[in-house]
Amino acid sequence: MFEIATHLVVLLVCAAFLAGFVDAIAGGGGLITVPVLLLAGASPIEALATNKLQGSFGAATAVVSYARAGHVKPLQQLGMAAVAGLAGAGGAMVAHLMPADTLRIIMPVVLVAVALFFALKPGLTDADRIQRIKPAVFAFTAVPMVAAYDGFFGPGAGSFYMLGFVLLAGFGVLKATAHTKMLNFASNFGSLLVFAAGGGIWWGVGLAMAAAQIAGAALGAKLAMRIGARLIKPLLVVTSTALALRLLWQVWG
């Protein structure tokens, strides 16, 4: 049934629950699941592909949770989601063709910048801010760039979507979090289709992790909606910083 030993599956399921919880609030769930998948014996491609499988379920659960509470209307995001899905698939297609060494060096710097922005920027609340670009421009600039990165590399994509919604679309922190999940799901799903066609997914393990992701994401979204920016901001800072440190360790450790 499972591709690996049962005790390793239990470890991965626990990691997936925690990742779903964190990802529903601030993004960065891949920081937890990808290293654990590698620790369990997955190759880099198997880890990335299996992570996309279980992560898609967590993102979809967060979308449903936020939509039921009225924080997002998924039908209004279908255009952006289509762009994200196509860009995510494109990113996955080039994942085997382009060396990621340069990206791994740049990413920690960018993630530290994200963490510092949310930690130090005054006035970041759940209230909407000034819209700097039109939705159509946002959909065809920021969205495909983040989505392509999500398909190609992955970790931190949720934080980048979030930053785009806050800085460019003018959303409050909670609204940005809610709208991020639909695009995160789309780019995850688009890249998942590419990885599924190429093989490499641990289906048994991935589906077990998906069940845990659903539970974690539901709990995380519930807490985020209850507490809002007071929970989202510090967790985003912690996850972005932790991911940056993890990437730095991979490059220079």
Image: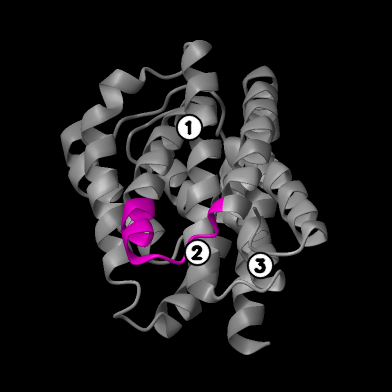
In which quadrant is the C terminus drawn?
bottom right
View extreme (right): residue: 7
Q: The residue tagged with tag 3: helix, strand or loop?
A: helix
Pick the front one: 124 or 173: 173
Distance Cα–Cα, label 3 vs label 2: 10 Å
Q: The residue tagged with tag 1: helix, strand or loop?
A: helix
Q: Report whether residue 109 is seen.
A: no
Question: Mark 1 highlights which residue?
Answer: 60
Residue extent of the magenta highlight: 191-203
Q: Residue flagged by tag 2: what amino acid is it?
A: Leu
Question: Mark 3 highlights which residue?
Answer: 35
Q: Do residues under tags 3 and 1 come within 8 Å of each other at their CB atoms?
A: no
Question: Mark 2 highlights which residue?
Answer: 48
- Relative to 35, say whether 230 is above or below: above
Q: As drawn, is 146 to the left or to the right of 116?
A: left
Total labels: the figure holds 3
Distance Cα–Cα, label 3 vs label 1: 22 Å
Q: Report whether residue 46 is seen.
A: yes
Relative image position of residue 197 (x, y in whole percent): 32, 60
Relative image position of residue 114 (x, y in whole percent): 53, 55
Distance Cα–Cα, label 1 vs label 2: 18 Å
The main secondary structure of the magenta stretch is helix
